[in-house]
Image (cartoon, rainbow, N blue to C red):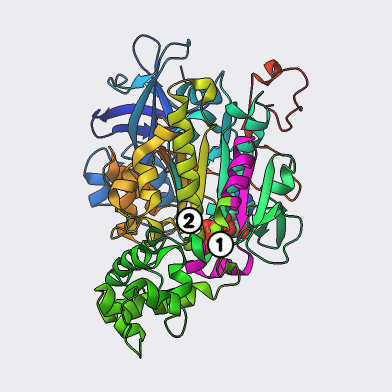
Amino acid sequence: MSGPNQVGVVVGGSLTKSLEVRLDPGASAALGHYVMAPLDGGAQLLGMVTDIVLRSAEAGSVSWPPPAGDDPASALLREVLQDTGVYTAVEVTPYLEVDLTGGDNARARRLPRHFAPVALADQETIDAAFAVDEKASINLGTPLGMDRVEVCVDIEKLFERSAGVFGKSGTGKTVIAVEMLDARVQHSANRPTSADRTVALVFDMHDDYGQRIKFEGGERASLKGLHPQDVAVYSLERNAINVERRIEIGTRDIKPEDLDVLRDVTSLTAPGVEASHECEARLGIDWVDEITQPVPSAAVVRRLWGDEDAPEDVNWARVASRMGVHPGSFDNLRRGLRSLVRREFVRSGESQVNDVINHVVKTLQGGKSVVVQFGRHGNDLTSYMLVANMLSRRIWEEYREAKEQAQGNRTKEPNRLVIVIEEAHKFVDRALAGQSIFGQIARELRKYNVTLFVIDQRPSQIDSEVLSQIGTKFCFQLDSDADVDALVGGVAGRAALRQVIASLESRQQALVFGHALPMPVIVRPPDLPAVRTPGASLRDRLQQQRPAGAPSPAGLFG
Ligand SMILES: Nc1ncnc2c1ncn2[C@@H]1O[C@H](COP(=O)(O)OP(=O)(O)OP(=O)(O)O)[C@@H](O)[C@H]1O
Ligand SMILES: [Mg+2]
């Protein structure tokens, strides 16, 4: 009963560790391949090759191996021993019992019998395993070495909890993030109302998610380029063209909570940030403008000393001591703020953010995704973190309020929002996770219809509690064992997954696992071609049922 894709037969193993499969003569299987074997009762056991071993039937042939020479006798001896005295076996980690007749799949609880045939998995089994037959899904790519099979992930499941893309520089993180979001935007565009659309708010550090994405040897169309109607671009730059609106921050908008997260990237210290609370309380709404002046203004003196006789020579040291703040901390705060407000997008004496937030929230709730481009400010981590944090905190509050006001009435709830941030570890660093709005969003999960999509090179630096809230993980090649451990540390079968991650190539290969997938996959994401149809990786087999008049989605299955 050897099928066309058969690679070997089961010769041993254990459910908790791995199944041992002896390869048929001439057959080969590599790390990451999906294989299947029949179970009693008709289901298929689906597993992944996680190790390859060379075995011998008895010790003689390996204790006294045949000579290596080219002479006919040695060659014959080697040929005779191959696949008789010695053979290759693969270890298969069992994951799922797949019911091909449409029933439910289950975690692997049984093993096939001895000598059961083992074959490379086919498309039908993979689709049944990932339960994407009837649902809209995204093509993640092909399992390694299995070019004719596609692995798809249920799009709603992927975005229903937070997700993360991890890997060192140049591995393909941004490319896959754009692919996922492209499919998301396309799928949302096919929905009848804005309330049904999941929209993205992308903090686009390096200008990759607007019109174009940087790509080796040229550029490719990105979210706005692919979906001009469904994506709005905002920019921090003064002369940006083709944008919805410029984003500016007024000094009156800056709150002590906004400074906390900057401790890591500026010279601001914890006592410095602490002092800001006192300054805001004592000096009022203009506290930032006031304390960034070279000398204390008359207004400051009046506020602190009232109508009492203020001392003649009021300087900042006296102001600090009057407020009961340590002069060193106060100095640190002043210096930190002065460097912040020098930035081109910060406007003194003004309040801008409410306007910006209203505009962005209206766009999002109207069903469009938003890309905030940083332009040349993208290389300045302080600007990126300040703006991403300020906007996210306030937008999240708007969403929370809208959700609470809906009081469980689904039709009144805001649409779902996914916030995309790069360099996530800077925001949810182990030391800072308590302060960061992103830590809070991750922890509160989808309670308020807001989730995160994080992109990061150093997962080991992310607060472990936040990391554990990330449902689906895309893991490209990583720099260090600590990063690998941070991702797979608590996952069943971690030893095998570690092996797999260690074998990933330096680009366009990823291990994907977690919430949206019933078992881990190693995939080669689809190539990003020079010319691309919008939503090319979206698979929507039910799209015929979309409402009349909705735009026809491109890039359909088949
Ligand atoms: N799916 C793909 N198809 C074709 N080429 C790809 C693909 N993924 C990655 N590449 C190649 O790898 C390069 C780097 O990818 P990308 O910019 O996504 O890396 P990154 O992980 O975001 O790096 P960084 O951390 O430096 O931002 C791309 O410019 C492209 O040449
Ligand atoms: Mg990138």
Give whichever of discs 2 and 1 has the lower sequence position. 1
Q: How far separated are the C-alphas under marks 2 and 1? A: 9 Å
Q: Quadrant of residue 443?
A: top left
Report x, y in % for residue 16. 23, 31
Above or below, comparing residue 263 to residue 294 in the picture? above
What residue is drawn where x is 74% and y is 51%?
530
Q: Quadrant of residue 58?
A: top left
Farthest bottom residue in view: 313
Tell me if label 2 and label 1 are in contact, CB under 8 Å: yes
| Element at label 2 | helix
Quadrant where ligand 1 appears = bottom right
At 28% from the left and 81% from the top, the residue drawn is 328
- What residue would you read off at disc 2? 390
Does the magenta run of residues contain 385?
no
Identity, as a three-letter code, of the amino acid under mark 1:
Ile
Q: Secondary structure at mark 1?
A: strand
- Residue at 32% x, 57% y is 460
Q: What secondary structure prevails in the magenta region?
A: helix
Question: Would the CB of label 1 be found within 8 Å of ligand 2?
Answer: no
The residue carrying pointer 1 sits among few (fewer than 14), some (14 to 19) or many (20 or more) residues within 10 Å by Cα, namely many
Q: Residue at x 33, y 55 (%)?
A: 435
Q: Which mark is residue 249?
A: 1
Q: Considering the image in quadrants, where does the C terminus appear?
A: top right
Residue 354 visible in rendering: yes
- The magenta segment is 355-384
Crowd rating for badge 2 (residues with CA inside 10 Å; few <14, some 14–19, many 20+): many
Residue 368: within the magenta? yes
